[in-house]
Image (spheres, rainbow, N blue to C red):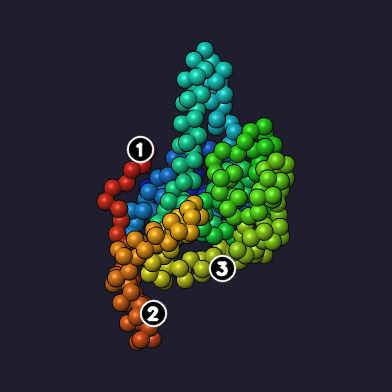
Amino acid sequence: MAYQTMSLTVENHIAHIQLNRPDQYNSMIMEFWQEMIDIFAEIEQTPEARVVVISSMGKHFTAGLDLTAFAGIAEEMNSDLDGARVRERFKNTVLEMQESFNVIEKCRLPVLIATQGGCIGGGVDMISACDMRYCTEDAFFCIQEINIGMTADVGTLQRLPHLIPSGIVRELAYTGRRMFADEVKEYGLVNQVFENAEAMLEAVMKIATEIASKSPLAVYGTKEMINYTRDHSVDDALKYMAVWQSGMFLSRDLLEAASANQAKRMPEFDNILAPKKMVRRSP
């Protein structure tokens, strides 16, 4: 499938999404939100994919939301249409935009994201939904929404407090200041900082390759458990783990890993099966 705001390649079990509007600083136009949902739906239907890497072309990772693309919403709110109905529809628009990053978190595969230059506004929403984050020395992150008179609404305020201290999240969200690479590393928002984009992508691909060499069923279970534990009590999470393990423990992967270890060879695992049905918005 062809995309206007990004591209997708799958090689060596790695699905690589690349934002590809560098001249526009990879700003998030209207098409971006639908394409993010569609591209993850395509990945879910690609059994060969075992891990996802998101990167971008150009000087900046993303300038965030393209406000000109949403001029129609402001016009509609100032129209003669019933205000309550317009606001109800706008609520659903926000929910749809949230789903564009929810699919990252819901994806069965780990999602690694590599950022350079500016990661602004919606970019922070995006990285907050990923499993692991990496950046370059020139990277900076900004919860831009407060600077344009609005509250961040696509996931930053809900996910970021699980990743870095609440006080830092509040400072960033209230002031809209930039947080640079040394600070994001200090607070643990990114795993590693690299000299430049080329070195970063090379290293991230190596990490992705290592993940792809593991049992895809076990990796999926690990992501499921980590995400579930974040939102539930330890007791509930342990009970869910027991139920999950009762269904997934005795797999071919377990036997293959043991056999490969005994024979001192790399294990070869089957791909996980694609879902039979995908419930997604139509393009």
Q: What residue type is labelled 2?
A: Met
Residue 282 is labelled as 1
Instruction: Between residue 213 and residue 239, name the one nearer to us.
Output: 239
Mark 3, residues whose alpha carbon is within 10 Å: few (<14), some, or many (≥20)?
A: some
| Horizontal and vertical percent position of residue 264 | 38, 86
Judge left or right: residue 84 versus residue 44.
right
Label 3: element kind? helix
Label 2: element kind? loop
Q: In this view, does 76 lie above or below 166?
A: above
Which residue in the structure is indicated by mark 3? Answer: 203
Marks 1,3: beta carbons within 8 A: no
Residue drawn where x is 48% and y is 32% of the image: 93
Label 1: element kind? loop
Q: In which quarter of the image is residue 71?
A: top right
Q: Can the viewer see residue 126? A: yes
Instruction: Between residue 18 and residue 78, name the one nearer to us.
Output: 78
Q: What residue type is labelled 3?
A: Ala
| Horizontal and vertical percent position of residue 121 | 62, 43
Residue drawn where x is 30% and y is 53% of the image: 275
Q: Can the viewer see residue 3? A: no
Which residue in the structure is indicated by mark 2? Answer: 266
Q: In this view, does 176 lie above or below 46?
A: above
| Horizontal and vertical percent position of residue 231 | 49, 52
